[in-house]
Image (spheres, rainbow, N blue to C red):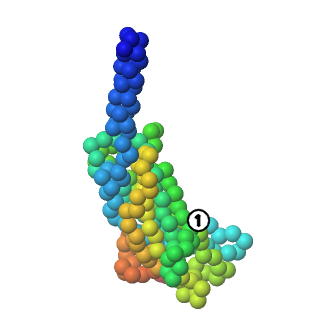
């Protein structure tokens, strides 16, 4: 074997070793090993009215916690909304880029994620009447996260409560736990 052939073999071997080391260092992240989800809440949000029509859209909200020992630079969240009785069909979805290089998620840090569906119910009547309309169907939300180059990983499913606004708003208003409609307090002029 000539010296040139030996150098060629050594060069190819070095390239293979480098490729192998690169492949080991570029593992696809596992979102469930890096993140925890807590404080999941699903509710209906009142959207801006248009042309005399009122709109409500399902929302899922949760806290995403970095349980790893590394800063995360690329995390996305997505929700798929389905109507009960039509679970095999996607009714709507929502997406958010949660973490980026400009705003990384440090180890131990949490961030609130709110995903609004692009599908809505609409009515010319009051928002409060939509939940009792014969064509209204309750909804389900399945929420996913992705870290870097990972695939989408489901973190759970939840029913969308027949409630306007998140639980924390209902609690702050002093509403009973199952109350679907926030009732504003009486105006000062009504007390006179």
**Along the horizontal axis of the image, is 179 left or right of 32?**
right
* Disc 1 target residue: 118
Q: Residues within 10 Å of mark 1 (few under 14, many from 20)?
A: some
Secondary structure beneath dot 1 equals loop
Against 143, residue 8 (above or below) is: above
Give the image quarter of residue 158: bottom left
Q: Residue furthest bottom?
A: 134
At x 45% / y 43%, what residue is drawn?
A: 100
Give the tally of numbered discs.
1
Q: Is residue 123 visible?
A: yes
**Along the horizontal axis of the image, is 128 left or right of 106?**
right
Give residue 83's position: percent from left, percent from top: 52, 77
Give residue 46's position: percent from left, percent from top: 56, 70
Q: Is residue 190 visible?
A: no
Give residue 130's position: percent from left, percent from top: 57, 82
At x 34% / y 28%, what residue is drawn?
A: 17
Q: Nearer the viewer, residue 170 or 55?
A: 55
Q: Nearer the viewer, residue 22 or 189?
A: 22
Give the image quarter of residue 26: top left
**Along the horizontal axis of the image, is 111 left or right of 129?**
left
Q: Residue furthest top?
A: 3
At x 38% / y 20%, what residue is drawn?
A: 9
At x 28% / y 50%, what residue is drawn?
A: 67
Q: Residue furthest front?
A: 1
Screen quadrant of the N terminus:
top left
Against 186, residue 69 (above or below) is: above
Give residue 154's position: percent from left, percent from top: 40, 62
């Amino acid at each position: 074997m000539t010296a040139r052939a030996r150098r060629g073999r050594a060069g190819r071997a070095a390239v293979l070793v480098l490729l192998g080391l690169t492949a080991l260092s570029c593992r696809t992240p596992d979102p469930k090993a890096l993140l925890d989800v807590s404080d999941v809440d699903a509710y209906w949000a009142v959207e801006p009215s248009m042309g005399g029509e009122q709109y409500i859209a399902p929302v899922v909200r949760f806290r995403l916690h970095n349980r790893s020992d590394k800063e995360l630079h690329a995390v996305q969240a997505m929700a798929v909304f389905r109507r009960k009785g039509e679970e095999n069909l996607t009714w709507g979805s929502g997406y958010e880029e949660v973490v980026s290089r400009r705003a990384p998620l440090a180890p131990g840090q949490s961030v609130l994620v709110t995903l609004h569906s692009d599908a809505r119910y609409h009515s010319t009547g009051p928002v409060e009447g939509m939940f009792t309309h014969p064509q209204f169907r309750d909804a389900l939300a399945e929420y996913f996260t992705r870290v870097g180059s990972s695939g989408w990983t489901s973190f759970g499913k939840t029913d969308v409560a027949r409630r306007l606004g998140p639980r924390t708003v209902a609690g702050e208003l002093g509403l009973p736990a199952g109350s679907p409609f926030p009732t504003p307090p009486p105006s000062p002029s009504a007390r006179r």
